[in-house]
Image (cartoon, rainbow, N blue to C red):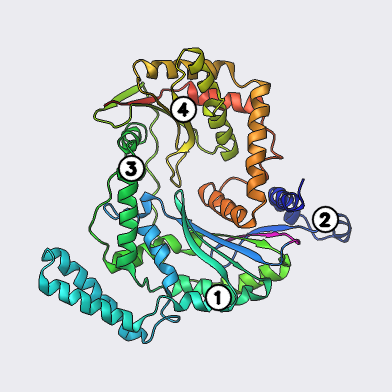
């Protein structure tokens, strides 16, 4: 095993054991016999969750911060706002990047009103002139490049915002000696956020989302699946065409406060640092927040599907059969991944059975959990597309019922374990990728331990029990027809 991979996997495994290590007393005997921990999982006084992983082979530090960004975080009609404000956050703060904070606040309020007038007057000449003047004033009072330049001087390399499933992540690379200064800027970004260039970034986000929506003929199918299986869940808005009305500044600032509150953030740091001093530093730095505690409503509970539900979406560009079953809550994400791979992988049970049934031209894709959302158990989704889908839904359902009864064979389990090991090795070989994966995983499944997926054994009984429970329940079926 390559050294970088072995270190990363060892530290992952130690995360699963860390609660045991730190729950024990500090007796002299334990101090002599217990290995020095290589990871910590804790919360700072302001509520931020931190996971620190030591990799002595690294001279730098990868720092990732994950925060929520699924449709439930956005007001109806403003889907993508959580991602927009996260992207805008690197444009600086009231402290870093502002020529005159008081004047800039007034200028940004003026710009907000000007955008409202553009829509109220349908783009009158007067409204357009005022918009240009307001934008020019804002540009003269705030510089979106200063924050990145200050980060670079610390030094910080490659600061970037990414949207990963139902989350956004801030990733950056620094050195151990700069962690105190970087912490100060990370907190300043959270507490003193301006959201400069918000209209432009919103327009870019809207364009990206509209193009993605138009390019995916399955969106109508996905929306119908959620309506049938998870009625009332906000995830459905992620598969509807985005609106065009821009957010007001107050809405954007509210979205920032809601999604960036420290109680809703996960920080993962991987690098060559000493655990105890860094924990002490972070607990001093991340002590308080002025952001209001968000009032969160739980997603509507998933009502058990009492009978098989079927629906048809006409006029589709792609003939498709989509079948979904509700997943039980509290499941290990690795086990859900294994279920999806066993059933719908390239050589999975469904693909092989379809070939035996003479359906060689069927393309299968299986996902669990789906849709990408926080706080919900989600669905097992099977998608089967072909030029001719006549009778395909019944074939897929029968194969899945047969698969639930027989369960995975030892050969299938071995193939799944091999695939998972290859995936884990690829992630562990890149500390930046590993930090991002862990942060997103912990935000999405906060109750699950973080552990090395390769060392976790997949038993036929566990997978069979899950398959029987899920595939033996009532599904929803949506057929897309031309």
- Answer yes or no: is residue 240 visible: yes
Q: Camera-side residue: 139 or 263? A: 139
Q: Quadrant of residue 38?
A: bottom right
Mark sitting on residue 364: 4
Q: Nearer the viewer, mark 2 or mark 3?
A: 3
Is 21 included in the stretch rendered in magenta?
no
At which x and y percent is residue 393? 38, 19
CA separation in Å, label 4 and label 2 = 47 Å
Residue 215 numbered tag: 3
Position above or below: 297 against 282: above
How far apart marks 1 and 4 lie (CA) works out to 45 Å
Question: Closer to the camera: disc 1 or disc 2?
Answer: 1
Q: Is residue 98 left or right of residue 148?
A: left
Label 4 sits on a secondary structure element that is strand
Q: Are discs 4 and 2 less than 8 Å apart at CB?
A: no
- 53 magenta-colored: yes
Measured from the top left, where is residue 358 in percent x and y? 46, 13
Mark 3 surroundings: few (<14), some (14-19) or many (≥20) residues within 10 A: few
- Please name the residue that numbered disc 1 is placed on: 152
Q: What's drawn in magenta, residue-wise?
A: 49-57
User: Which badge, 2 or 3, comes first in the chain's sequence?
Assistant: 2
* Crowding near the residue tagged with mark 2, few <14, some 14–19, many ≥20 C-alpha atoms within 10 Å: few
- Asked if 325 appears above or below 23 in the picture, the reply is above
Q: CA distance from mark 3 to mark 1?
A: 37 Å
Q: Tell me if 425 is positioned left or right of 407 in this view.
A: right
Q: According to the image, label 2 marks what residue?
A: 35
Q: Residues within 10 Å of mark 4 (few under 14, many from 20)?
A: many
User: Where in the figure is residue 8, as x and y percent of width and height?
Assistant: 70, 52
């Amino acid at each position: 095993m390559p050294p970088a991979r072995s270190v990363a996997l060892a530290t992952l495994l130690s995360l699963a054991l860390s609660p045991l290590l730190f729950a024990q007393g500090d007796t002299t005997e334990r101090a002599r016999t217990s290995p020095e921990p290589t990871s910590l999982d804790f919360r700072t006084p302001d509520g931020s969750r931190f996971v620190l992983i030591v990799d002595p082979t690294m001279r730098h530090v990868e720092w990732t911060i994950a925060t929520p960004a699924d449709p439930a975080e956005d007001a109806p009609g403003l889907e993508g706002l959580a991602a927009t404000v996260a992207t805008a956050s690197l444009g600086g703060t009231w402290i870093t990047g502002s020529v005159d904070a008081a004047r800039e606040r007034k200028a940004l309020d003026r710009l907000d009103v000007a955008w409202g007038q553009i829509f109220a007057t349908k783009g009158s000449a007067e409204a357009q002139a005022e918009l240009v003047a307001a934008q020019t004033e804002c540009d003269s009072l705030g510089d979106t490049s200063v924050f990145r330049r200050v980060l670079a001087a610390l030094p910080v390399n490659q600061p970037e915002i990414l949207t990963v499933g139902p989350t956004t992540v801030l990733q950056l690379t620094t050195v151990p000696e700069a962690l105190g200064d970087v912490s100060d800027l990370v907190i300043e970004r959270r507490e003193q956020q301006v959201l400069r260039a918000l209209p432009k970034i919103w327009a870019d986000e809207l364009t990206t989302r509209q193009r993605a929506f138009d390019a995916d003929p399955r969106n109508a199918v996905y929306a119908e699946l959620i309506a049938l299986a998870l009625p009332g869940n906000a995830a459905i808005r992620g598969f509807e065409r985005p609106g065009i009305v821009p957010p007001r500044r107050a809405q954007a600032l509210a979205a920032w406060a809601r999604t960036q509150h420290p109680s809703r953030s996960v920080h993962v740091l991987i690098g060559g640092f000493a655990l105890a001093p860094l924990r002490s530093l972070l607990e001093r730095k991340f002590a308080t927040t002025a952001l209001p505690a968000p009032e969160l409503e739980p997603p509507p509970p998933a009502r058990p599907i009492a009978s098989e539900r079927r629906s048809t979406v006409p006029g589709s560009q792609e003939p498709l059969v989509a079948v979904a079953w509700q997943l039980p809550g509290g499941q290990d994400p690795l086990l859900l991944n294994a279920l999806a791979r066993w059933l719908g992988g390239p050589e999975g049970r469904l693909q092989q059975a379809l070939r035996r049934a003479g359906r060689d031209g069927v393309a299968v894709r299986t996902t669990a959990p789906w849709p990408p959302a926080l706080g919900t158990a989600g669905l097992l989704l099977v998608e089967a597309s072909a030029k001719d889908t006549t009778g395909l839904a019944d074939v897929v359902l029968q194969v899945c019922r047969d698969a639930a009864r027989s369960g995975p064979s030892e050969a299938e389990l071995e193939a799944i374990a091999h695939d998972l090991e290859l995936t884990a090795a690829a992630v562990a070989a890149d500390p930046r990728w590993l930090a991002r994966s862990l942060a997103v995983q912990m935000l999405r499944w906060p109750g699950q331990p973080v552990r090395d997926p390769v060392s976790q054994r997949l038993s036929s009984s566990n997978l069979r029990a899950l398959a029987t429970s899920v595939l033996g329940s009532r599904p929803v079926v949506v057929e897309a027809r031309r």
